[in-house]
Image (cartoon, grey):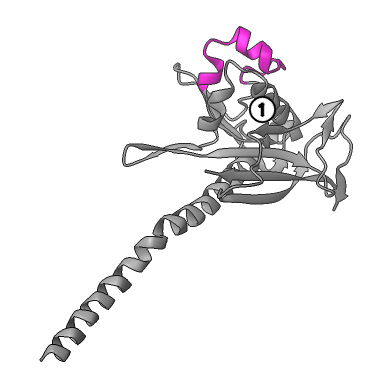
Amino acid sequence: MDFLMAITIFALGLVLLISQVPMLFAPLQTVSTDIQPVAYRTSMILVEDGGIYNETTGYITSNWEDPEGTGENYSQNCINITNYTDNVKRIGLAMSTMELGWSSSSEDIVPNTLSVNKMKALQDWQEDTANQSKIVKKLGLLVTYNNNPINYSYNISLVNFSDNLIPNSSAPLLQIGDSIPTSGSVTVEKIERIVAIDNTTGLTGNRTIAGHECAKLVVYVWR
């Protein structure tokens, strides 16, 4: 009788232990499986979307870097357009078909072909310390789950096929975000996308592929 009771208690304990093992590893699995799709989604939006600029008047365009079509840069837009950075709802880097002279709406974009003007605007935004913190939201990386914020860090850059930054004069054309952690228990996801560049005048380090000047957009995401 005692032996049977001992076996029963042991079996119940074993079942309880087995049921708890997945919970011990669930936090680790959640982080690792959560980061990869977030990094991929971020890279996809940047490469395959032109972005969204939307004013309270209802005016909307994907040309967030130059919404009024005046050729002004980021700093000039901040001065001349009320609530410019708030009107940018989403950051995308894909070029507009209007740059190609196609007879289509200004909202059409060319996926996987990045606009140099959009990359310059994003880089200027990164260097604007007063508004820099808004970028994470425009990238879709400021999210909440069960009313709790999920804090993602990121690093985004344009590099050549030797993994060197593509320069714009003496500075990188695009290198934004946080420093990539190299130590500690941090899960970092890296996504690389081969992209074409719409205008390589003054740029060096890009490679010609099938008649297009190409580089790599590298996206790191971690938390």
Q: Check the image and name the residue furthest to the front.
A: 2
Residue occupying image coordinates x 14% and y 85%: 5
Along the line of sight, which residue is nearer the eye, 65 or 203?
203
Residue 40 falls within the magenta-colored stretch: no
Residue type beneath disc 1: Leu
Q: Check the image and name the residue furthest to the left.
A: 1
Q: Can residue 211 be seen in this view?
A: no
Along the line of sight, which residue is nearer the eye, 124 or 198?
124
Residue 71 falls within the magenta-colored stretch: yes
Q: Name the residue under label 1.
A: 122
Magenta region, residue range? 67-87
Q: Check the image and name the residue furthest to the top.
A: 80
User: How many numbered marks are there?
Assistant: 1
Q: In this view, does 97 lie to the left or right of 203?
A: left
Q: Position of residue 116 (x, y in %)?
A: 75, 31
Disc 1 packing (10 Å; few <14; some 14–19; many ≥20) = many
Q: Is residue 95 visible?
A: yes
Q: Is residue 161 above or below residue 115?
A: below
Residue occupying image coordinates x 78% and y 37%: 198
Q: In this view, does 113 lie to the left or right of 88?
A: right
Q: Position of residue 154 (x, y in %)?
A: 60, 39
Residue occupying image coordinates x 65% and y 41%: 180
Q: Where is residue 189 in the image (x, y as percent from the top left)?
A: 60, 51
Q: Is residue 186 left or right of residue 69?
A: left
Name the element at disc 1: helix
Q: In this view, does 117 lie to the left or right of 80?
A: right
Task: Identify the image quadrant of residue 143.
Answer: top left
Q: Where is residue 38 in the image (x, y as percent from the top left)?
A: 52, 47
Q: In this view, does 171 lie above or below 8?
A: above
Residue occupying image coordinates x 87% and y 47%: 207
Task: Identify the image quadrant of residue 160.
Answer: top right
